[in-house]
């Protein structure tokens, strides 16, 4: 069964600190993996996309890693800001029924405190 | 350059009524995807449409739910005879050509509450 699991479920950190969010997936065949940020009451916004051959991808203070062998990904946020408070969702494309059919994790809720 | 637009943002219906959710894709995008997010769950794929065509509706319940994307105008997700279990956030996404690796851009969602 194609699944995406994320940990932790929620996280609270102080402004300026770093954090790392985890994603494990069982989607096969694998096409690509994205990290999305979803603010409360808004739709998800894409942060990074990685294909099978990519190990790391950065977007400003966000750095995503991918280990396609162990089917794990992480999102590292550096020097957190209050505006980073949101849900971070790991999304995998693949499976036999179409790469357009995104498979979403349940997200990690990050709260950054002043 | 407006993003994906959805309306209404919030919709309240009584059991048995109909709900119509609208999605206007980004300019130049001809591929639309609908997802549903139940409370405390991740988004789940419902249906994928191109202009005037349903490409994949495998995630959409067979009864009461329908979707269309006409040649002119927004995509519509229609839920007939709503039940309390239909209460959820419904997100629409769009992409330019539907090819693999292409990023889907999401709208703000419609939050449906069935009383």
Image (tube, coloured by chain):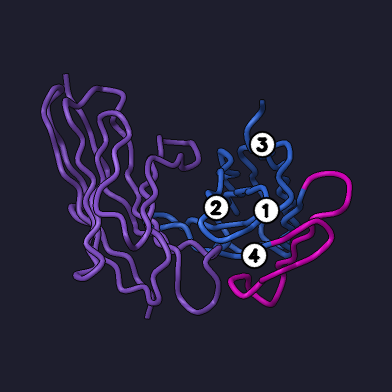
Chain colours: A purple, B blue
Mark 1, residues whose alpha carbon is within 10 Å: few (<14), some, or many (≥20)?
few
Image quarter in which the N terminus of chain A is found: bottom left
- In primary-sequence order, the first of circles 4 and 3 is 3
Badge 3: chain ID: B
- Residue at the image point whose x is 45% and y is 69% from the top: A94
Q: Residue furthest top?
A: A114
- Give the mark, 2 or 1, whose residue is nearer the N terminus: 1
User: Does the residue at mark 3 contact the one at mark 1 (Cβ under 8 Å)?
Assistant: no
Magenta-highlighted residues: B49-74
Q: Residue at x 66, y 60 (%)?
A: B15
Q: In this rendering, would A85 be left or right of B13?
A: left
Is label 1 in a helix, a strand or a loop? loop
Q: Quick one: label 3 or label 1, which is nearer the N terminus?
A: 3
Q: Which chain contains the residue that carries disc 2?
A: B
Q: Are marks 2 and 4 in contact (CB under 8 Å)?
A: no
**What residue sits right under mark 3 in the picture?**
B5
Residue to which mark 1 is pinned: B97
Q: What residue does disc 4 label?
A: B47
CB-based contact (under 8 Å), mark 2 and mark 1: yes
CA–CA distance in space, label 3 to label 2: 19 Å
């Amino acid at each position: 069964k194609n699944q995406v699991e994320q940990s932790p479920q929620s996280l609270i950190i102080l402004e300026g600190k770093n954090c790392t969010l985890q994603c494990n997936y069982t989607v096969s065949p694998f096409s690509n993996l994205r990290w999305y940020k979803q603010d409360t009451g808004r739709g998800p916004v894409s942060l990074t996309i990685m294909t099978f051959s990519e190990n790391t991808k950065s977007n400003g203070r966000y750095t995503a890693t991918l280990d396609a062998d162990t089917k794990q990904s992480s999102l590292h946020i550096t020097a957190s800001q209050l505006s980073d408070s949101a849900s971070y969702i790991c999304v995998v494309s693949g499976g036999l029924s179409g790469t357009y059919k995104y498979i979403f994790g349940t997200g990690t809720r990050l709260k950054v405190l002043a | 350059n407006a993003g994906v637009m959805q309306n209404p943002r919030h919709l309240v219906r009584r059991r048995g009524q109909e709900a119509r959710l609208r999605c206007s894709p980004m300019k130049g995008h001809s591929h639309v995807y609908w997802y549903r997010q139940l409370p405390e769950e991740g988004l789940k794929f419902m249906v994928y449409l191109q202009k005037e065509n349903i490409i994949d509706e495998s995630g959409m319940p067979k009864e009461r739910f329908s979707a269309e994307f006409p040649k002119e105008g927004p995509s519509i997700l229609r839920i007939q005879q709503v039940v309390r279990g239909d209460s959820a956030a419904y997100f629409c996404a769009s992409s330019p050509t539907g090819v693999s690796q292409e990023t889907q851009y999401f709208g703000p969602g419609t939050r449906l509450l069935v009383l």
